[in-house]
Each structure stands twice: as structure tokens, then as C-alpha cells.
């Protein structure tokens, strides 16, 4: 079943938000000195990227 215009818009907005979060997390990871905290931030970034990928698959 095809998505409505509103659903497509909402998914696009979610993708933008998740993409921004991924960029911020990448920036934070470059600034963090503690290796454990850096690993945590990198894990969060990977999770965020998976969200972007899942949302993008719904639009295609």
C-alpha cells in the first residue's frame, strides 16, 4: 500500500532528525577523550544510522 503524502512527509522529517543526530554524535565522538564514553557515543551513532536506514527503506 503506498504511503500518503503526509506519511511520506513525516518519514522525511524523521530522517532529517535522525541524520542530524548522527552528525552531532560523530562530532561528539571526535571530542570525547574517555575511550569508554567514545565507544558509547559511537554505538549510539550506529543505532541512529540504522534508524535512518530503516526509515529510508519505508519511503522507497
Image: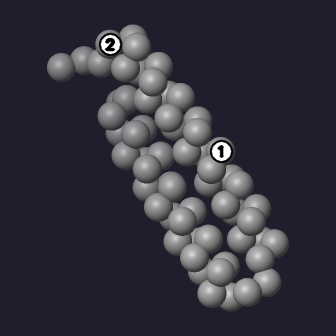
Residue indicated by mark 2: 4
* Mark 2 neighbour density, 10 Å: few (under 14) some (14–19) many (20 or more): few
Residue at point 25%, 18% (across, down): 2
Quadrant (top left, top right, bottom left, bottom right) of the C terminus? top left
Element at label 1: helix
Q: Give x and y (percent) for residue 38.
A: 67, 79
31 over 25 or under it: above or below: below
The CA span between labels 1 and 2 is 24 Å
4 over 32 or under it: above or below: above
Q: Residue furthest bottom?
A: 35
Count the marks: how many?
2
Looking at the image, residue 25 sits to the left or right of residue 43; the answer is right
Element at label 2: loop
Residue at point 57%, 76% (across, down): 40
Looking at the image, residue 54 sits to the left or right of residue 24; the answer is left
Quadrant (top left, top right, bottom left, bottom right) of the N terminus? top left
Q: Give x and y (percent) for residue 35.
A: 68, 88
Residue at point 52%, 71% (across, down): 43
Residue at point 43%, 29% (across, down): 11
Looking at the image, residue 45 sits to the left or right of residue 34; the answer is left
Looking at the image, residue 43 sits to the left or right of residue 28; the answer is left
* Mark 1 neighbour density, 10 Å: few (under 14) some (14–19) many (20 or more): few
| Label 1 close to label 2 by CB (< 8 Å) | no
First reached walking from the N terminus: tag 1 or tag 2? 2
Residue indicated by mark 1: 20
Q: Give x and y (percent) for residue 57.
A: 35, 39
Amino acid at each position: 500500500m503506498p504511503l500518503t503524502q503526509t506519511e511520506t512527509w513525516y518519514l522525511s522529517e524523521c530522517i532529517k532528525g535522525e541524520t542530524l543526530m548522527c552528525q552531532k554524535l560523530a562530532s561528539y565522538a571526535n571530542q570525547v577523550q574517555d575511550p569508554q564514553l567514545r565507544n558509547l557515543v559511537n554505538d549510539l551513532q550506529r543505532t541512529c544510522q540504522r534508524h535512518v536506514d530503516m526509515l529510508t527503506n519505508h519511503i522507497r
